[in-house]
């Protein structure tokens, strides 16, 4: 992948990635935190995006390392960036169904 293509891909994926992680964090908060602590504040998208990235910073989750980008195809990079949160969301939803049932 050429450097300018990587830059364009980065600029397109980062906002999608942030919104997706924020949305997943909002859902997980509503499903698992709110039932345990009803006094906890309702979490909206913007604070959820911030919290998810603070957690990633503290836990040192760098996701896809920069040196790995050159070895991956476009489909693999998009799949890793957007597929990971969607898989996490799906399994969270399954656990939520078990908790509610």
Image: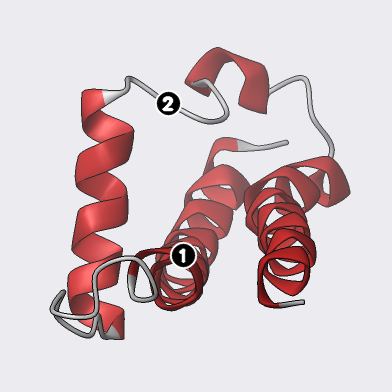
Q: Which mark is residue 32?
A: 1
Task: Report the side of 99 relative to 67 (left or right).
Answer: right
Task: Report the side of 3 relative to 86 (left or right).
Answer: left
Question: In the image, what residue occupies the spot 77% across and 20% down?
Answer: 71
Mark positioned earlier in the residue sequence (2 or 1):
1
Height in image: 98 above or below 30? above
Height in image: 17 above or below 44? above
**Helix, strand or loop status at disc 1:** helix
Task: Report the side of 47 relative to 77 (left or right).
Answer: left
Task: Report the side of 96 relative to 76 (left or right).
Answer: left
Q: Looking at the picture, how far across and down is residue 38, in whole percent?
A: 24, 80
Question: In the image, what residue occupies the spot 50% across and 74% down?
Answer: 31
* Near-viewer residue (21 or 79): 21
CA–CA distance between discs 2 and 1?
A: 25 Å
Residue 55 quadrant: top left
Which circle, 2 or 1, is nearer the viewer?
1
Query: Coloring scheme of the render?
Result: secondary structure
Q: Which mark is residue 62?
A: 2
Question: In the image, what residue occupies the spot 69% across and 48% down?
Answer: 84
Q: Quadrant of the N terminus?
A: top right
**Is the Cβ of the residue at disc 2 closer than 8 Å to that at disc 1?**
no
Height in image: 93 above or below 44? above
Q: Looking at the picture, how far across and down is residue 52, in whole percent?
A: 31, 53
Crowdedness near tag 1: few (<14), some (14–19) or many (≥20) residues, C-alpha within 10 Å = some
């Amino acid at each position: 992948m050429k450097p300018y293509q990587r830059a364009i891909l980065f600029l397109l994926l980062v906002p999608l990635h942030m919104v997706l992680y924020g949305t997943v964090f909002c859902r997980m908060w509503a499903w698992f935190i709110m039932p345990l602590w009803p006094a906890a504040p309702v979490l909206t998208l913007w604070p959820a995006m911030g919290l998810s990235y603070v957690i990633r910073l503290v836990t040192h989750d760098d996701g896809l390392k920069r040196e790995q980008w050159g070895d991956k195809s476009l489909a693999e990079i998009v799949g890793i960036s957007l597929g990971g949160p969607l898989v996490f969301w799906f399994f969270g939803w399954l656990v939520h169904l078990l908790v509610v049932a």
